[in-house]
């Protein structure tokens, strides 16, 4: 009985089906135990959307999803940081990005799988451009990188519309440009739907996305970063929850690799902020995710 309520003793929460709407079990962080991580999630009534960031990880996400009758789905897309070759070096992320040229037809063909629930992770990332500008990029080169990100995002947005799929949007230090692009695109594609993943801005910015028919999604940042009190002000049908695993692990597992089963801690924190029961947040976000991804 997959949608029944059940008791989870170790966290003292009564929960129903949870959906981690954004994780990366297709990444190398899980190369040795991806099946165990997914089993642990499914055994704990947690479904997941496994999100690609380039063609190889998108293919991997689809192959993983196709192993399961239900509960595991894929998103495919080219992340903006993978348009250039450079070293990504942050607290939780260290790797060499290889430049990839977006192949519209290759991603379209990959989307033929019935387990593909969205186009993503796509978007704009100016954070890393700014970091590189301090070391290696001229002003003209910065603008060229930004323009490339915009054009590739627009092409992936249009692919999503052709396939009637939602988009999962990454945006870092680029909300002004992203909102402008979406406002222009929505004029031609009024039924377009998308989610701004790992949202950590403010109520004013959130409302601008809501006005465009988009929703937002929260990660473990709500558990260990201050300033999310405004979550209590947003409509219940406008947000989902995610882990962004293997990154942004919430307490009580900070310092460990994140995984989908930890999405329950995000639900609990949002319930605290909104002053409602955990059950209400679980029910609401699960219904939102099922509707958004059509699963």
Image (tube, rainbow, N blue to C red):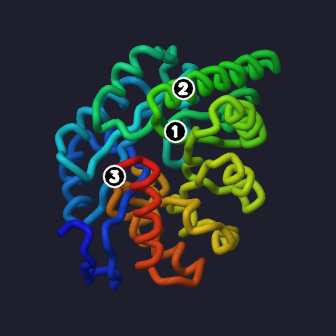
- Name the spot of residue 121 as percent of width and height, x first: 49, 37
Q: Which quadrant holds residue 256? A: bottom left
**Label ID, residue 167:** 1
Using residue 165 as the reference point, say whether residue 35 is left or right of it: left
Sequence-first disc among 2 and 1: 2
Give the residue at x 34% y 39%.
74
Identify the element where label 1 is drawn: strand
Residue at the right extreme of this rendering: 139
Q: Nearer the viewer, residue 226 or 155?
A: 155
Q: Which residue is mark 3?
A: 48
Of tags 2 and 3, the one toward the viewer is 2
Q: Residues within 10 Å of mark 2 (few under 14, many from 20)?
A: many
**Label ID, residue 226:** none
Give the residue at x 58% y 21%.
155
Above or below, 13 relative to 42: below
Q: Which residue is mark 2?
A: 156
Q: Which quadrant holds residue 136? A: top right
Q: Residues within 10 Å of mark 3 (few under 14, many from 20)?
A: many
- Are the residues at dot 2 and dot 3 in contact (C-beta closer than 8 Å)? no
- Are the residues at dot 2 and dot 1 in contact (C-beta closer than 8 Å)? yes
């Amino acid at each position: 009985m997959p949608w029944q309520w059940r008791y989870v003793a170790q966290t003292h929460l009564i929960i129903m089906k949870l959906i981690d709407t954004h994780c990366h079990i297709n990444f190398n962080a899980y190369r040795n135990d991806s099946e165990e991580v997914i089993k642990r999630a499914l055994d704990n009534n947690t479904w997941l959307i496994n999100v690609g960031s380039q063609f190889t990880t998108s293919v991997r996400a689809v192959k993983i999803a196709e192993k399961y009758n239900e509960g595991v789905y894929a998103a495919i897309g080219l992340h903006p940081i993978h348009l250039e070759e450079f070293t990504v070096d942050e607290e939780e992320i260290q790797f060499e990005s290889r430049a990839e040229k977006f192949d519209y037809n290759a991603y379209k063909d990959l989307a033929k799988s019935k387990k593909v629930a969205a186009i993503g992770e796509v978007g704009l990332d100016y954070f890393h451009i700014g970091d590189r500008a301090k070391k290696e990029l001229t002003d003209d080169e910065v603008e060229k990188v930004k323009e490339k990100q915009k054009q590739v995002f627009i092409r992936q947005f249009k692919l999503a519309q052709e396939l009637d799929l939602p988009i999962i949007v990454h945006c870092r230090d680029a909300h002004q440009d992203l909102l402008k692009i979406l406002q222009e695109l929505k004029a031609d594609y009024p039924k377009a739907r998308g989610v701004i993943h790992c949202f950590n801005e403010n109520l004013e910015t959130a409302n601008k996305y809501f006005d465009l028919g988009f929703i937002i999604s929260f990660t473990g940042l709500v558990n260990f970063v201050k300033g999310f009190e405004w979550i209590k002000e947003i409509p219940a049908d406008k947000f989902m929850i995610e882990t962004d695993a293997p990154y942004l692990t919430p307490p009580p597992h900070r310092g460990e690799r994140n995984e989908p089963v930890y999405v329950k801690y995000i639900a609990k924190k949002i319930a605290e902020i909104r002053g409602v029961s955990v059950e209400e947040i679980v029910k609401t976000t699960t219904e939102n995710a099922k509707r958004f991804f059509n699963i």
